[in-house]
Image (spheres, coloured by chain):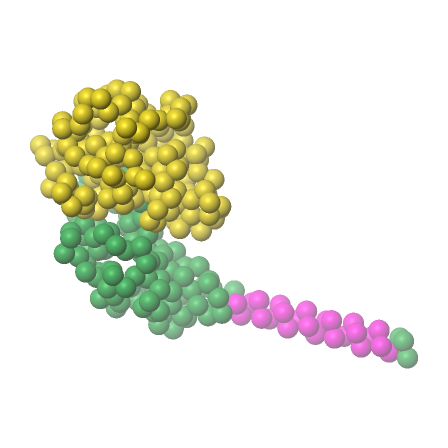
Amino acid sequence: MTKKYNYLLLASLFVITCLLIVQNNIAAKEETSLHKKDILKALFKNQDVLLKKSSHCNGVGTEESDLTIGDYLSGFWAFHGNKNGKNWIEVEIIKSSNSIYLAKVLLYRKDQEENWGWGVSFKLDNKTRVQRDSFTCIGSG
Amino acid sequence: MTTCKINVKQYLGMNISSLCSNSYHKSSDNHCAHFVSHVLGFRFGFKCRGMSGKGNKDDSASIRVHEVFSKCQKVGKWTSKSSATKFCLAFVTSSSNVNIKSKVMRNHPRKHIGIFLNGNIYHYSNSKNKVVKQTPAAYANHYSGNDVTVYYGTMPK
C-alpha cells in the first residue's frame, strides 16, 4: 500500500513539474511577444494622453503650452534634429504581471555638457492595448 | 541666512555611483540635480528610485533641475545675489527658460545646477562623469549662447 502511495506521489510530482515547465515556457514566449516597434506604435496611438492626468509629468514639457504626452516627447525629440553629438532612443519591455507589460521609451542626447534622457513609461497588454492612466514621465536633469 | 554643515569638498572627483545607493548610475543620464539632491537631502518630486526601480525609498533623491528651482525659497539672477550669501544653489540656462517672478524654469534640456559654497560652485559634470569645482565666472560658460545666465536659489525648506 505504502509502495503504491509512493509511486502515486512521485507520478503526481512529475506531472506538476511538467506542467510548471510548460507554463514557464508559455510565459517566456509571452515575454518576447511584444517588439520595440509595437511599443512605439502603441505610444504614438496614445500621444493625446494629458500630462496633467499622468504621473510626475507636471512641468516636464519643453514649452509651458505642452498639454499632452505627444507635446512633451515632440519637444525633446526635436533636439535630435541636431547632428552634433549623439542622439538615440531606448525602448525597454518588462513583464509587470500576468499579460501586462511595462514599457519604457526614452529619448537620449549627449553633446559635451548637454546630456539628457527624457521619456515615458506605460503599461500595456500583449495585444498592445495601453492602460492610458498608467503613463509616467521619466527622466532627469 | 542658511549655513552649510556639509563638507561638500569631500565629493570632488566622485562618480554618482559613490553617492547613490539606488542604482541610478547610467552615464547617459543627467546627474546634476541628482548629485545636489543626494548631498543636500532633497526628497521631492520625481526621484532616483523612480528611474532605477531599485533601492531604499528613504535614500531616494530628487533628480530634476526645474523641480528644485521651483522649491527654492528665493531665486534671482546671480548678479543680484547678495555678496553676503556664501551658500546657495547655482543654476545655469538660457534666460528664455526662466521666469523669476513665478519661480518657474522650463524643462529645457540645456539647464544645470550646482552648489555654491564659499566662492566656488560644486557640480556634477556629465561629460567628465564626476563632481567638479568651478568659479562662478567659469560656470557661466557651461553652455554656449548669448543669453546663457546664472541664477541663484536659496535652499528649499
B60 in relation to A18, above or below? above
User: Residue lying furthest right in this view?
Assistant: A1
For the image, the number of numbered tags is: 0
Q: Which residue is depicted at the point 10% across and 34% down? A: B147
Q: Which residue is depicted at the point 24% across and 44% down? A: B70
A33 in relation to A121, above or below? below
Identify the chain drawn in yellow.
B
Identify the chain drawn in green.
A
A94 in relation to A23, above or below? above
Residue A134 x %, y %: 35, 64
Residue A90 lies in magenta, yes or no?
no
Residue B20 located left or right of residue A119: right
- Tell me if I can see residue A80 in this picture: no
Which range is magenta?
A4-27
Residue B3 x %, y %: 33, 26
Residue B16 x %, y %: 40, 34
Q: Which residue is depicted at the point 56% across and 67% down? A: A25
Screen quadrant of the C terminus of chain A: top left
Screen quadrant of the N terminus of chain A: bottom right
Residue A19 lies in magenta, yes or no?
yes
Closer to us: A11 or B115:
B115
Secondary structure mostly taken by the magenta-highlighted segment of the chain: helix
Using the rendered view, name the quadrant where residue B156 is placed: top left
Residue B70 located left or right of residue A130: left
Q: Which residue is depicted at the point 29% across and 20% down? A: B118
Using the rendered view, name the quadrant where residue B8 is placed: top left
Residue B2 x %, y %: 31, 29
